[in-house]
Image (cartoon, grey):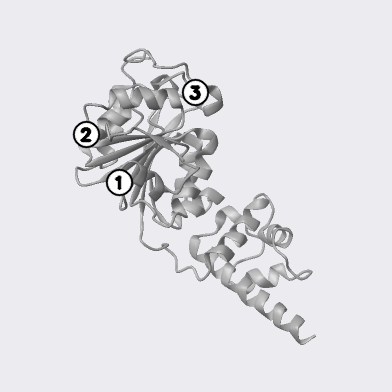
Amino acid sequence: MPRRNSSIARRPAARPRSAAPRRPLPAKPRKALGQHFLHDDDILDRIVRDGGFAADEQVLEIGGGTGELTERLARVCGHLVSVELDETLARFLRGRMAPYPNVAVVNAGVLDFPPEHLLAEGGGRPPYVVAGNVPYYITAPILRRFLTAAHRPERMVLLVQREVAESIAAGPGKMSLMGVSVQLYGDVQVLFRVPPSAFTPPPKVDSAVIRVDLHRRPVVDVEDEERFFAVVRAGFRNPRKQLHNAIATGLWLPPDSAPDLLRSAGIEPSRRAQTLSLDEWERLARAYGVLKQEIDQSRARH
């Protein structure tokens, strides 16, 4: 079970004011947890402003860290549940957030429990929005956790690696598996870039803040989400290959049937995965469903 406080204590890239943190760190950053603490005041203020956080919203924060973003969110949102895996930082956060009765700190891993469980531990409940400086090595699992949750957030405002942000937001021609996965559920914006000097310690890469406004339903009328993603994963397993070769090795298909399958979905077999739109992926998924059903029926007759 996650550990929480016993009572709810509850534009172009911005240029940092200074490469030095505003106050001493409460603990040495742990490389194993991907800890890079954002300390730049201008950027922290801009995350809250451009993220659109409001007084009538409940926020689930991923990784409260030193509390710089946590405190700013606490001043504007109705209720905030800050989830922090590091026990030392969780204790520090509880002390720093003590003046804010609308804040709860939950000592847990954000991937270890469903979002609604973490919210409940901090006295919150859906609907909610998500904010946070995401450890770069678990960006994809975190996105997948919230996008496939029983109660998806209404919005996510996340600080991620710049290349990942641009990949998530890219359109057909530069699509990625992660981009398809996120854009199926919401509209993606790259709000602004963040330089390494805005963090302690500085990461080796540039970062960016993304905003994902989620819809109640997928933006494409997906007949079977499990089949849809099976087809998309097959296509991106070998993204440099022409699509007929990629899906032939990524899906169970009769010999030499991949080109005909793609043509039946109105897709040229020589195209590559990154060029397909969400609508085309769904057409291909439906065509694959029809083909698979025909194969199953043929087997049953024999």
Which residue is tagged 3? 203
The image quarter in which residue 32 lies: top right
CA gap, disc 2 to disc 3?
33 Å
Q: Give the amino acid type for the residue marked by disc 1 in the picture.
A: Gly
Which label's residue is closer to the chain start, 1 or 3? Answer: 1
Residue 273 visible from this viewpoint: yes
Q: Callout 3: few (<14), some (14-19), or many (20+) C-alpha neighbours within 10 Å?
A: some
Q: Which mark is residue 101?
A: 2
Which label's residue is closer to the chain start, 2 or 1? Answer: 2
Front residue (pair 296, 67): 67
- Farthest bottom residue? 301
CA gap, disc 2 to disc 1?
13 Å
CA gap, disc 1 to disc 3?
33 Å
Mark 1, mark 3: which one is toward the viewer? 1
Residue 86 image point, x, y percent: 46, 27
Which element carries disc 1, helix, strand or loop?
loop
Which residue is tagged 1? 124
- Are the residues flagged by discs 2 and 1 in contact, CB closer than 8 Å? no
